[in-house]
Image: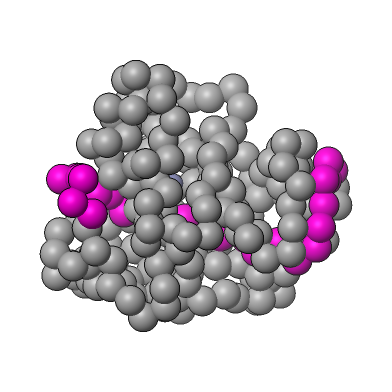
Amino acid sequence: MKIVCIGRNYTAHIEELENEKPEDPVVFIKPDTSVLLKKQPFFIPDFSEDVHHEVEILIKINRVGKHIDRKFAHKYYDQIGLGIDFTARDLQHKLKEKGLPWEKAKSFDGATVIGDWVDKKQFLDVNDINFTLEKNGEIVQKGNTKFMLWKIDELIEYVSKYFTLKIGDVIFTGTPAGVGAVKAEDVLIGFIDKKQLFSIRIK
Ligand code: ZN
């Protein structure tokens, strides 16, 4: 199983990191070893002083596909989820400055939180899903999929030009504004609408 992540998919988040608006989606892959085991705390790695939470809507692929047309993309997933793409921002900045790949900053063990899944049929429109991240009881990130630069079906079309999508692969669709650092004893809770999909303690 692979995890395909989209960067810079919400304009407000692009502005907060002072990135340029991309012409094409930014795509990177995390290995399955980065997935945080269920019910485990997230341990801040010793190589970073500035690990950020990025809450994102997830798509779970349910059939094999390559060169998927956006018209048919909706047939390739029937579950929507919520997760965190933890990012060692200090390390990522260093790597970006040197033009090096981001993996060490985003793909380390535990850096990928995958919450519970929700049947797609529960949503009237996948392009209008509200989601939030609470840190210690306060909302820190709030998004809606209608503000994505590339919508879910367009992302599936784009990603599958490069990578065959397989059953069980997960797409992280990018984070909205409000990313920020975590510290020991923080508790992060993710919601789609009012439904809680994960709760993570930081150590
Ligand atoms: Zn991300």
Q: Where is residue 198 in the image (x, y as percent from the top left)?
A: 40, 74
Q: Is residue 38 above or below residue 108?
A: below
What colour scheme has been applied to the protein in the rendered image?
A: one colour
Q: Position of residue 118 (x, y in %)?
A: 60, 76
The quarter holding residue 95 reads top left
The quarter holding residue 69 reads top right
Q: Which residue is drawn at 47% across and 60% down?
A: 33
In front: 149, or 82? 82
The quarter of the rendered structure image containing the C terminus is: bottom left
Q: Is residue 154 visible?
A: no
Magenta residues, start to end: 45-70
In front: 51, or 9? 51
Q: Is residue 97 above or below residue 140?
A: above
Does 49 lie within the magenta span? yes
Does 20 lie within the magenta span? no
Q: Is residue 200 above or below residue 53?
A: below
Q: Where is residue 13 in the image (x, y as percent from the top left)?
A: 38, 38
Q: Position of residue 104 (x, y in %)?
A: 37, 41
Q: Residue at x 54, y 40 (%)?
A: 28
Q: Is residue 20 visible?
A: yes
Q: Residue at x 32, y 34 (%)?
A: 92
In front: 177, or 49? 49
- Left or right of 80? Residue 106 is left
Magenta span main SS: loop
- Left or right of 75? Residue 167 is left
Q: Residue at x 72, y 36 (%)?
A: 162
What is the number of callouts on the image? 0
The quarter holding residue 161 reads top right
The quarter of the rendered structure image containing the N terminus is: bottom right
